[in-house]
Amino acid sequence: MEAWIVFARGPLFRLCFSIMVLGLARVLWLTGIGIIEAYGRSDDRALAYREIFRQTLGWALPVGRAGRARPLYSLTSVLFHLGLLLVPLLLQAHVRLWQSVIGIAWPVLPAAAADGLTLLMLVTAVGLFAGRLADRRSRAISRLQDYVWPLLLAVPFVSGFACANLTLAPLTYQAGMLLHLLSADAVMFLLPFTKITHCVLQPLSQLVTAVAWKFVPEAGDRVAATLGFADRPSWAERSRLGGPHS
């Protein structure tokens, strides 16, 4: 068992870390190329950079939108991501492991704070899974990985917390530590190939929308005319779905 732990903590960790970094770099590169190409094809190249920046911050820190729709689910998501990001990056044992690969270290979380964030992540992971399962609108747009990821991400947190805080028999501890390492390696390996790529794409999300969703000149007026709303301006803030005579 010890040999497997050494393998999972050493060569396998470095391999999965390299795949994660290179894979995410590839995703960023392709996204950047796509943005440049879309911008080059567009006739309308005016971009409201200040509004794009404001919208990007708004999606990264959805405090302003938390009370609009499903506020409890939004708050749960924010807390989930807080633990998900801080514990892997700032736990003392993790920082030593990162240092063994990239050669640099950084300040760590106090143990009590790391434990608290771990428990917070686990509770909110269950909450996200249950919230998605219980809401009809969420179920309608969910794929299998939307249900699997919160549970998969919880595995290294559960096993790591148990190994660090519970009194375990040696063989149980080794099995728990091996599960912790293998599940964390699996998460890193899968990151570039799944929806979790949003961890690096989120800062570009609003820019992609602003650049890519450009219509040909006067397209809005033509669509409005087709729908029977030719007498109304295409820039109206209120929805046109109230009907032509509303």
Image: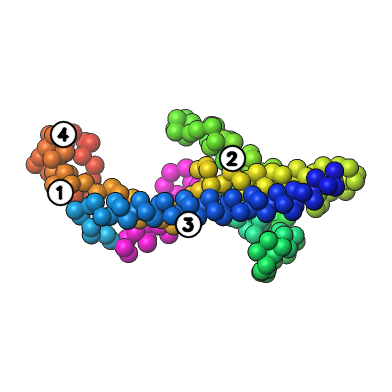
Residue sitting nearer the eye, 195 or 102: 102
Q: Earlier in the sequence, mark 1 or mark 2?
A: 2
Residue position for label 2: 149
The residue stretch that appears in magenta: 49-74
Q: Residue furthest right?
A: 169
Residue position for label 1: 217
Q: Quadrant of residue 226?
A: top left
Residue plotted at (19% across, 53% down) = 43
- Distance from disc 2 to disc 4, alpha carbons, whole Å, reads 41 Å
Circle 1 Cα neighbour tier, 10 Å, few/some/many (<14 / 14–19 / ≥20): few
Residue plotted at (29% across, 51% down) = 38
Q: Amino acid at mark 1?
A: Pro
Residue plotted at (13% across, 40% down) = 222
Q: Earlier in the sequence, mark 1 or mark 3?
A: 3
Q: Amino acid at mark 3?
A: Leu
Q: Where's residue 2, x and y in %?
A: 85, 47
Give the numbered dot on residue 227.
4
- Distance from disc 4 to disc 1, alpha carbons, whole Å, reads 18 Å
Q: Where's residue 239, x and y in %?
A: 24, 42
For label 1, the SS is: loop
**Is 236 left or right of 69, judged from the image as shown?**
left
Q: Are marks 1 and 2 in contact (CB under 8 Å)?
A: no
**Is 75 left or right of 16, judged from the image as shown?**
left
- Distance from disc 1 to disc 3, alpha carbons, whole Å, reads 34 Å
Residue position for label 3: 61
For label 3, the SS is: loop
